[in-house]
Image (tube, rainbow, N blue to C red):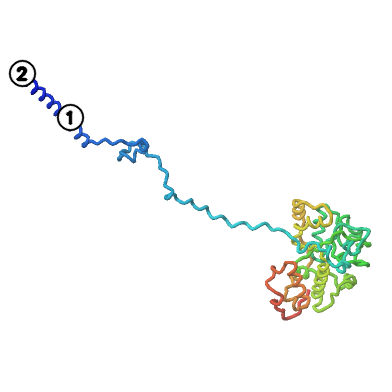
Amino acid sequence: MQAQQVVVASVVVLLVLYGIALVNTRKDTRRLQTPHLTVPKRLAKHNTLVGAGNDTSRSSPPSLPSHPIYVSPPSSPPPSSPPSPPPHIFSPLRGDQTATVECKHLKDTNLQSARCGLVAKKVYPLLVTCTPRSGSVFTHVILRKLGYDMANDWAPAGPGKDGVVSWIFGVRDAVGFGPEHLNGARFRAVVHQVREPLASVTSMCTEPMETREAPFLARHISIKGPGGRLGNALRFFVQWHEHLDRAGLYTYRFDDLRQALPAITRLAGLHPPTDEAIAQAISRTPTTNHRSHRTTVSWPELKRVDPVYAKRLWTLATRYGFQADYTYNSFEDIPTQTGPMPHC
């Protein structure tokens, strides 16, 4: 009896073990047929990288940061336009050097100079001087419009409270010329205005150099020489400006009057005008004081008239910065005109 019970129990145990083995075998088979993969949480949000397939129902993944190797270089900025040239900065042809120039060059001027013993009881602030036909009338009008009491060459009452614009007072003359006289007075500041030489010499042909002005000019320069009136105008221009140059005066071109006015007035101890006031005065003033004369003389004509003085004129033109206006690089490049002698 006991033996039968043992046999039955053994069979039952074997059946249980077989059933367990069978169940495990089926599970392993299903695992192989339908594997289950676990997606790491750090990648789950990029559903197109793992298990997304072609499922378009899902939203597009956010862009991943590009690796630095594949970062496109920054686009080059558009080429900048060429830098604009700096604004024109005015500077005179020469600053005032009368404090250091030799006294012998000041004795024939009307500048007050205690250093050189050239002292007067009456001293006016400003003298603007030049040669005739060098823009002096225009300069006088502008200074008057700016409120300065300035006279011109032909004021019988003498200089204004602030001075005068005069080519005549460019030299010291005891006798005087014309209705205006200094009566021994001098000027705190004397400035030298220059105009383009060819245009100025041409216009000076209209001056009464050989008649009314002759005695006055003869006391300071000699205009006699070849070439008639044109030659006289050439020699007048050259000698007068050479005299003013030797005095070391503040010198500027007539075309730069607008920029020079503040410095000119400060040099004379006057209150300088504003840029706006200067612009308004110039815009309301005609720029011509025309006299009928021949067409502008040329360098070949002047070289034919008087080659010695033509070369001195070229030196002045170069010193005053006008050479760029001409077609010649040097005086030697200028041909001598042939044919009839040029004239005014």
Indicate whether 172 appears above or below 30: below
**Callout 1 amino acid:** Val
Q: Is residue 114 left or right of residue 12?
A: right
Q: Mark 2 points at which residue?
A: 1
SS class of the residue under badge 2? loop
Q: Is residue 60 left or right of residue 315?
A: left
Drawn side of residue 169 relative to residue 70, left or right: right
- 15 lies above or below 184: above
Q: Identify residue type, mark 2.
A: Met
**Residue picked out by circle 1:** 23
Locate residue 144, reporting x and y percent.
Answer: 83, 55
Q: How crowded is mark 2: few (under 14 residues within 10 Å), some or many (20 or more)?
A: few
User: Which quarter of the figure is the N terminus placed in?
Assistant: top left
147 or 203, which lies in front? 147
Depth check: give the residue in front, 285 or 333.
333
| Precedes in sequence: disc 1 or disc 2 | 2
